[in-house]
């Protein structure tokens, strides 16, 4: 039996699906769940994801069946029919998606059949069972995307050889998802590749409709989006590649080479684009050289994040900032194969460092893991202190940062102490933003 989760770092599957739908303009979620589920999800996503707000027909305006005791006893399908009908009449949207909570799945409501009763409606209505016992927010993302692949993405025999779909960045769970997608799209466009990110700036349901024309799916995570990519390949015949989430110039270069070579882009053109991006990147990075050296800003680091961010942040700190990341805590539920895949991403750092890697969902365990890898000073005459150090993680790491006197740079979900709008940590410009934020936290008290 797995242990309990202290202060979970993600919403449930229903919350993940709601957060993903919120990122698609005019896609309307209809929650079929117990009263209170919608409110709890709204609070978790809004505060935890850097105060993203409810958006159009989200937040406190989420359509919900709010099933009661009577519905639990006699079934909630009739209540769902009423809710779908009223939502179609009142809420102006282009797609309506029924999402379920735990209770209605436990009592056996057939939401898919109820949704199919509205197949003659002016706008499509689909249902995606998303009870929390199927997984967390990342699972909700996968369930929703796979449902859209089945029922909304149009079949296309002709493939565009320069078009790709980006998968693996989960809206809201990745607090910086919109800025990250913007940066990945920008650098791929410089290679002559049209990137369909689904949830990025200016994108809509039309991007899902046209996704079947892509010649490649690019999954920027070893854990999230892989199931969707496999389903894409089965249904629409689009192959996929998996690449780590890129932060900074070195990882950005690997990302561009991986995608460009897969699509047979001219290697000379790839090299020119990378060289241009690096010129800009290091021109800006040069500005911090004096303060970095004069104030000796090299630090030990503790990194806490999901299986996309933790390896990416660790590699960036080590290989680009020259820091010493001694401990990385990966906070996802992963099987043995996934853990092995994620662990491999920490290997081969240019610095030669070998950070201790721990897989733990419990927010209170980070302190224990740090003490395990770095023994406390017990009045030793000579003691190599774990200092100066910085914690790179979520708002949950505030306690450990305060106890040890380390600065905390909050970058992963939940992020309650920052307001996030268009910021990005992906790619070349994202690496600059992350460096800017880290250095700002270090010099803020000067």
Image (cartoon, rainbow, N blue to C red):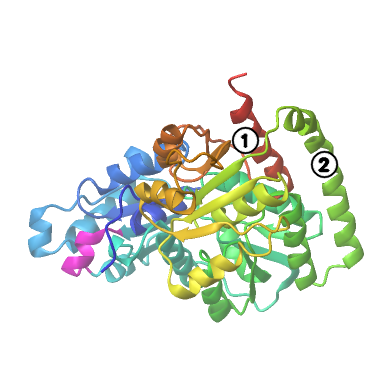
Quadrant for the N terminus, please: bottom left
The residue depicted at 40 percent of the width and 58 percent of the height is 360
SS at badge 1: helix
How many other residues sit within 10 Å of disc 1, few (<14), some (14-19) or many (≥20)?
A: some
The residue depicted at 62 percent of the width and 34 percent of the height is 437
Q: Which residue is mark 1?
A: 438
Q: Say if residue 124 shows up in the picture.
A: no
State the image coordinates of residue 246 (x, y, percent, origin top left).
Answer: 67, 55
SS at badge 2: helix
* In the rendered image, the vertical position of residue 88 relative to residue 213, given as above or below: above
Residue 203 marker: none
Magenta segment's dominant SS is: helix
Could you tell which of marks 2 and 1 lies nearer the N-terminus? 2
Distance between the Cα atoms at labels 2 and 1? 17 Å
Quarter of the image holding residue 122?
bottom left
* In the rendered image, the vertical position of residue 365 relative to residue 121, given as above or below: above
* In the rendered image, the vertical position of residue 184 relative to residue 222, given as above or below: above
The residue depicted at 52 percent of the width and 72 percent of the height is 340
State the image coordinates of residue 120 (x, y, percent, origin top left).
Answer: 37, 66
Residue range of the region highlighted in magenta in the rendering: 100-109
Q: Which residue is mark 2?
A: 282
């Amino acid at each position: 039996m797995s242990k309990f989760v202290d202060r979970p770092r993600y919403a449930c599957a229903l919350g993940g699906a709601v957060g993903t739908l919120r990122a698609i303009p005019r896609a309307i979620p209809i929650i079929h769940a117990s009263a209170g589920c919608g409110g709890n999800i709204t609070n978790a996503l809004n505060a935890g994801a850097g105060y993203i707000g409810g958006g159009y027909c989200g937040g406190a305006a989420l359509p919900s069946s709010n099933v009661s005791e009577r519905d639990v006893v006699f079934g909630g399908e009739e209540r769902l029919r009423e809710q779908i009908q009223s939502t179609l009449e009142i809420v102006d949207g282009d797609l309506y998606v029924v999402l379920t909570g735990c209770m209605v799945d436990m009592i056996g409501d057939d939401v898919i059949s109820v949704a199919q009763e509205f197949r003659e409606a002016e706008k499509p209505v689909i249902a995606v069972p998303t009870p929390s016992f199927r997984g967390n927010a990342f699972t909700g993302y996968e369930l929703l995307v796979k449902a859209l692949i089945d029922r909304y993405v149009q079949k296309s025999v002709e493939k565009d050889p320069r078009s790709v779909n980006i998968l693996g960045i989960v809206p809201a769970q990745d607090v910086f998802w919109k800025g990250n997608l913007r940066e990945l799209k920008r650098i791929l466009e410089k290679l002559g590749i049209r990137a369909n990110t689904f949830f990025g700036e200016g994108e809509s349901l039309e991007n899902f409709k046209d996704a079947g024309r892509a010649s490649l799916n690019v999954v920027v995570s070893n854990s999230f989006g892989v199931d969707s990519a496999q389903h894409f390949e089965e249904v629409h015949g689009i192959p996929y590649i998996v690449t780590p989430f890129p932060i900074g110039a070195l990882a950005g270069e690997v990302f561009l080479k991986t995608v460009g070579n897969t699509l047979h882009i001219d290697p000379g053109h790839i090299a020119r684009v990378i060289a241009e991006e690096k010129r800009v990147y290091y021109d800006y990075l040069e500005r911090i050289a004096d303060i970095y050296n004069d104030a000796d800003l090299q630090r030990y680091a503790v990194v806490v994040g999901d299986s996309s961010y933790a390896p990416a942040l660790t590699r960036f700190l080590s290989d680009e900032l020259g820091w010493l990341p001694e401990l990385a805590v990966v906070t996802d539920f992963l099987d043995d194969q996934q853990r092995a895949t994620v662990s491999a991403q920490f290997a081969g750092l240019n610095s030669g460092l070998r950070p201790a890697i721990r897989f733990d969902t419990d927010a209170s365990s980070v302190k224990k893991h740090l003490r395990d890898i770095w023994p406390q000073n017990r009045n030793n005459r000579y003691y190599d202190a774990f200092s100066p150090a910085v914690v790179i993680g979520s708002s949950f790491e505030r306690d450990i940062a305060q106890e040890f006197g380390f600065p905390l740079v909050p970058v992963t979900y939940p992020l309650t102490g920052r307001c996030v709008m268009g910021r990005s940590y992906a790619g070349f410009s994202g690496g600059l933003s992350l460096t800017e934020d880290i250095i700002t936290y270090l010099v803020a008290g000067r």
